[in-house]
Image (cartoon, coloured by chain):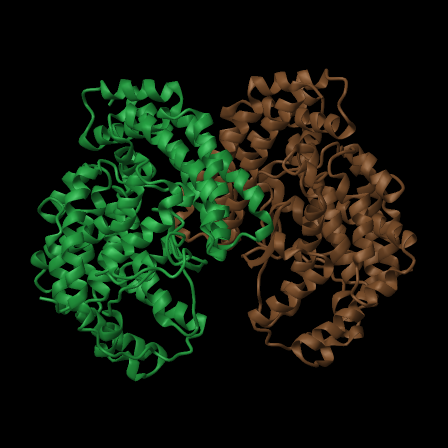
Chain colours: A green, B brown
Amino acid sequence: MGWHYAALEERLARIGHIEGALAVLHWDTAVCMPAGASAARGEQIATLKRLAHDLLTHDETGELIAGAEAEADLDPWQRANVREAHRRFRRARALEPALVEALARAANSCEMSWREARRRSDFALLRPELETLLGLVREAATRIGGALGLSPYDALLDEYQPDLRDSLIAPLFEELARALPPLLEAALTRNRPAVRPSGPFPEPAQKAFLEQLMARLGFDFARGRLDESAHPFCGGTAADIRVTTRWRRDDLASALMAVLHETGHALYGAGLPRRWFGQPVGEARGIVVHESQSLLLEMQVCRSPAFLRFLARALATAFGPDPAFAASNLEALWHRVERGLIRVDADEVSYPLHVILRWRLEKALLAGSLAVADLPAAWNEGMRELLGVVPPDDARGCLQDIHWPSGAFGYFPCYTLGALLAAQLFRAARTALPELDRALERGEIGDLLAWLRERVHARASLLSFAELVCEASGGPLGVEPFLDHLRTRYGAH
Amino acid sequence: MGWHYAALEERLARIGHIEGALAVLHWDTAVCMPAGASAARGEQIATLKRLAHDLLTHDETGELIAGAEAEADLDPWQRANVREAHRRFRRARALEPALVEALARAANSCEMSWREARRRSDFALLRPELETLLGLVREAATRIGGALGLSPYDALLDEYQPDLRDSLIAPLFEELARALPPLLEAALTRNRPAVRPSGPFPEPAQKAFLEQLMARLGFDFARGRLDESAHPFCGGTAADIRVTTRWRRDDLASALMAVLHETGHALYGAGLPRRWFGQPVGEARGIVVHESQSLLLEMQVCRSPAFLRFLARALATAFGPDPAFAASNLEALWHRVERGLIRVDADEVSYPLHVILRWRLEKALLAGSLAVADLPAAWNEGMRELLGVVPPDDARGCLQDIHWPSGAFGYFPCYTLGALLAAQLFRAARTALPELDRALERGEIGDLLAWLRERVHARASLLSFAELVCEASGGPLGVEPFLDHLRTRYGAH
């Protein structure tokens, strides 16, 4: 290892520490910050982002990368670290600071308009801001694509999931678009009546129960915490993982399902290799892989009939007996499907249809074949085609998600690709761990977690996305394990 | 206003935003951070400090300061801002980065040894580390003193309270050292029997009561919060003030007094001028002035007989009737004096004697006339002379405070100078506000706060320390208002 590599790693560590500080600021903003501090917080965050960006895009960084690439004696992790650093460097250098700033400002302003537009269900309030933002996103995507040799949409996808290309997505999504509507149709006929646990469930009791459950699933409270925020998320750093949820006294499932999902993210973060903490190669492999870990825990593990039997006992122990806690009722409750309007409330059968709609529309918006003004009509038409329902207003239609108004085009596909990967990994895990179902029935996921740590978490960003998927799950990403899972769980053979 | 000044202000704002981010990290470390994250947090903090230091000490900063100093059309605030920036620049440039790093490392290591040494009451565990640290502090003080034309001890004082000199402290402290022992002696004979409120006082009830009390005193929860930490403090930024305390179920006074003290700090921070938020001239005028604001609220206002009558009613309303809540009992309880061993537990009569001991010893340590090895004996001898008691062990003697092991020499005098200034300001306020006592009896401090805002808070660092003291309180800092206050309250005429 020569001095170029060593100096590069030191510089990347500094960037990593700034990003770690930013993670604390983001968490604090969502969980602790008093409202009056938001302008000052915005300045703090912008300043740290700028410092990290300046360090990354500095000419010296480019020289260190070039020097390190020429060093012959790097081990595979070091070489991958240089590769990931180079990827970030190229992306960051592709945009002039003025464009980065214009994007941040437009996204901030568009997001504020969106809040108002959604509240009033008035798309006209969002339209001009979204047009401006889309223009800037298109310009940035074109620049980055030019620098990386990618189409604009692939340049956007690549930000969230390195190496993800639309040529991978398209056949998978078109297959899902064909297979899921009849599957949903059949599953709808299998919905069973169910009662919701009656509660009330005071926040301290819910929190104590969920902290115990998280610990059982492998979450280490010496390196993380559980708090409340308006929208559940998993933030922080690998050394300090911050899970949040929201408490509803009358609805136990709200916090429970959010915590199970976020704990899946958290376990991935905690399983990243300590040696590479704060270095690009030590980061999670991308949003698709991250989402696969949260959905694997939430959907594959925790909603499995075996785990629901454990959960039924645990709930009764924590909150006292309630007929609604019967395993068969929990299954009826949490295996329901519906033709819904809202993505975040969707069951796992219909969820990909919501995503496919957004994927089609955001590509058309980016390409210019769909005008922003025509988005509401196109949305409603897509909902009719894919889900058979039409939103009565735009608040429950094209205004429901924050992603586009915050500038995140190319993010939606990650959710469904994550669901596919979760099913594929879980199938491989069940083959490798024949005792898994019995362990889940006892609420024990230790063996599964060890398997995931070795196959996925400990590899961080050592491999490319495609390599990781193949090496961890045994083959390239496909729809079959996911569809098979749905057919089994929702009885729609 | 020329471009030098404008560019300087922009650069200072960036430094201010980094410091704001650091304030959040410090608060999070004390209040939220899981134990396992401390190494990573240390790196985040060190990285941000280094970035702020690099920005401040950059040659360009010096050029901007010099250019701004030559600009003719600055207003008084801008000119003071340049002056304060220059002060920071000179101090920061006086130390090479290697010395700064060595100091930080030595202080960190010494602080860890101190925790163990105090736990075991074994000074020998601390001695070598403290010798190393003292050597580095001496070197830094000599360098800074050389750059600023100050003695080493003045160079240290100047860090915590700009413009504070030992030539100001010495006559005040020698006068206190003569006046206080007989005053304490007399006050001891006036201690009255008192009963402590019996409790228990559950944390949520204490917190609700204190939040209500803080709001009544003028604390704005849209720009701040109250949380729990091992040691009470007031942190955050002027836009986001974070007060902490600790809860003791059996001792209401512990959290109450801590919160009143920290709220005094908080109100100062909240009263700093918004226009100058994040600029050097917009900062508090130094630790002495800060401490004057906390002690004014805690000691002058909230322990006054008038306010205790309000507090007696408020406590009975919040926690139910208890004979211990009688105003006369609260007065007997919270106006007790004693010959104690521990500074942080000391009453306001004996507290300055604890400080004077430390002031004498830290000057001798710095000058080399007292060896670290001889500190325990010198401490015990000083306690005998000033307070008439001798610690039975070093844990309750020279190992009790974190200040020296963390590298903070020159800080202790600020506590007592703050108490003097508090008494002097409160005397001036009572003259200006003849209705003050009646307002305090109703728990209303609005007029007092408005007076403090105008006289002290809104001036931030516009004036020098000496100018601010004179303009706000009507004369230079002296001991008479403080001694007069003690004689009145403790009946020792």
Q: Is residue A326 above or below residue B424?
A: below
Q: Is residue B107 above or below residue A261?
A: above
State the residue at coordinates (32%, 35%). Answer: A368
State the residue at coordinates (26%, 77%). Answer: A313
**Residue A299 falls in image quadrant:** bottom left
Nearer to me, A279 or B143: A279
Residue A19: x and y in percent read 41, 38
Using residue B294 as the reference point, say whether residue A481 is left or right of it. Answer: left
| Quadrant where the C terminus of chain A is found in the figure | bottom left
**Residue A446 falls in image quadrant:** bottom left
Nearer to me, A56 or A398: A398
Using residue B331 as the reference point, say whether residue A295 is left or right of it. Answer: left
Q: Is residue B347 above or below residue A55?
A: below
Q: Is residue B102 visible?
A: no
| Quadrant where the N terminus of chain A is found in the figure | top left
Residue B427: x and y in percent read 88, 52
Residue A126: x and y in percent read 46, 46
Nearer to me, B409 or B463: B463
Residue B305: x and y in percent read 83, 66
Q: Is residue B235 visible?
A: yes
Using residue A199 as the reference point, say whether residue B444 is left or right of it. Answer: right
